[in-house]
Image (cartoon, rainbow, N blue to C red):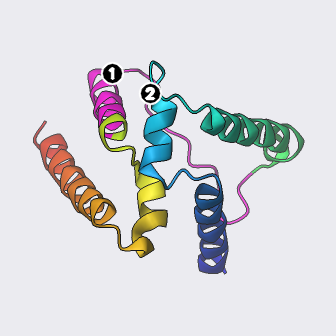
Amino acid sequence: MNNIIALVCGVLFGAGLTVAQMVSPNKVLNFLDLAGTWDASLAFVMGGALVIYIITYQLIIKKMKAPVCAQEFALPEQKNVDKRLITGSALFGIGWGISGICPGPAIANLSSGNVKVIVFILAMTLGIFVAQKLANKV
């Protein structure tokens, strides 16, 4: 049952990214280009998602003792902003700003066969592997 729920959530997420055009690198790059061809439409997508989440959190999630498909909420144990978090955030932002692609939309866009997306996912996978190896050495 958990796999079916995960599948439905994944399809819903991917459909939302596609309808909102967040799978389009050019759309994202235009959103990030504040001094040039700025396209504010993705701000409405993010704002709309935030409003829906805030309402859902206040009315439903806040009152739950555990998620629907788990025994307890998986909350982060690390609450400090450290060098690793800052470095990872910067690398994520730089990669997103250069390519216009981030992990969720890339996976949703994988079926398009776009070579840029395939190369991005391969590079992302390599980056995850290298980061895990480096983290294990520290």
Quadrant for the C terminus in the image = top left
Quadrant for the N terminus in the image = bottom right
Q: Is residue 93 left or right of residue 45?
A: left
Q: Choose between 113 and 85: the one closer to the eye.
A: 113
Against 49, residue 7 (above or below) is below
The magenta segment: 66-95
Q: Amino acid at mark 2?
A: Asp
Residue 116 position within the rendered picture, expressed as x and y whole percent measured from the top left: 28, 59
Q: Is residue 71 visible?
A: no
Residue 52 position within the rendered picture, expressed as x and y whole percent measured from the top left: 79, 43
Q: Is residue 64 left or right of residue 6?
A: right
Mark 1: few/some/many CA within 10 Å (<14, 14-19, 20+): few
Residue carrying label 1: 82
Q: Is residue 132 left or right of residue 52?
A: left
Identify the disc placed on residue 138.
Answer: none
**Under tag 2, what secondary structure?**
loop
> Extreme front residue here?
37
